[in-house]
Amino acid sequence: MTTSIVRWLSRNDVAQTNLPFTSALDIIEGTLRDHGDGAFENPPKIGIHPGQDAFIHAMSGWLPRQRRAGLKWVAGYSSNHKVGLPNITGLLVLNDPDTGLPICVMDAAYLTVVRTAAASAITSKYLSPPYVGRIAVIGAGLQGLYHVKMLSLIHPDAEFQIVDINENAVGRLAEQTYSKATVVHVKDAEPAIRTADVIVTATSRLEDVAFQFGWVKEGSLVLPVHVRGWSQDITTASDVLLTDDVEQFKNYIIATGSPYRDISRIRGSVSDVIVRRVAGRVSNADRIAVFNLGLAMHDVAIGSAILDIAEQHGLGTILSY
């Protein structure tokens, strides 16, 4: 029998590939076009919830045009920081589409934060108001940092108002941005949201309402990284309501218990807007809310790009299968 091999990429190996953010943005935009064209398989994520603040999800995806297939097994434990552990951990398995055999297993924490922020950035490319002068990012953690990195590539002249109770965390974020972006610390979410053209809520999972949609000014785009935390009227008072995958969003809301009673006004997906199947921003005054829950096809596409770089540079450990 032929011996098969698997490449193992640790967190350090993945970081060493140094996937350019511009490439990540191109990959995410391309896979969103595939989604809009129907050239994908991305079944709704399934998961278990061992604790109130915890989830472990399985996310599989197939991209026939690129012939890339895989599955991410990802866990989110918002209290892990209390014991010195990362909140998001996981593994991505990539498979040979011709044989089904695994060809790579890699740490999935980095690619998760990259693809999440890149998806927000591409969403803002198509749905932001014509002029973006100020972006509010609520939360100065890893998601906050990578959202600043990605959004600054789409909106290079925007000022970033970062809301976090920890001023030192905002300082670290500003130092690690490595761009010309202007970063300002704001103590409270309300004034930042009221003046922002794009709003990203990049906190950990919230059980209670922390943000009122009534604070959002005309023309602004709202991008919740996690579903919960906004007032009920985000789904009813927004002029345009979208998600990254309608079936997955509805499935998730039913499975986890909806924090929003009325999601009937979901117009479609971001990919529908990109391929011009659905109108996005009709008026400059439209207040738009987009719930990007995360697509497995994005994980597979970003992970495949990381694998390509790793193979070129001989990174990782080769194991017999």
Image (tube, helix red, strand yellow):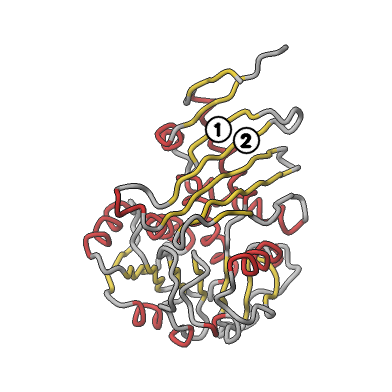
- Measured as percent of width and height from the top left, residue 206 is found at 43, 69
Looking at the rendered structure, the number of numbered marks drawn on it comes to 2
Amino acid tagged 2: Leu
Marks 2 and 1 sit apart, C-alpha to C-alpha, by 7 Å
Residue 104's place in the image compared with 19, above or below, is above
Q: Name the residue: 58% across, 66% down.
A: 256
Which label is found at residue 105? 1
Say whether residue 37 is left or right of residue 202: right
Q: Quadrant of the C terminus?
A: top right
Which label is found at residue 94? 2
- Whether pointer 2 and pointer 1 mark residues with C-beta atoms closer than 8 Å, the reply is yes
Q: Residues within 10 Å of mark 2 (few under 14, many from 20)?
A: many
- Measured as percent of width and height from the top left, residue 7 is found at 55, 25
In the image as oriented, which residue stretches furthest toward the front? 50
Say whether residue 271 is left or right of residue 158: right
Secondary structure category for the residue under label 2: strand
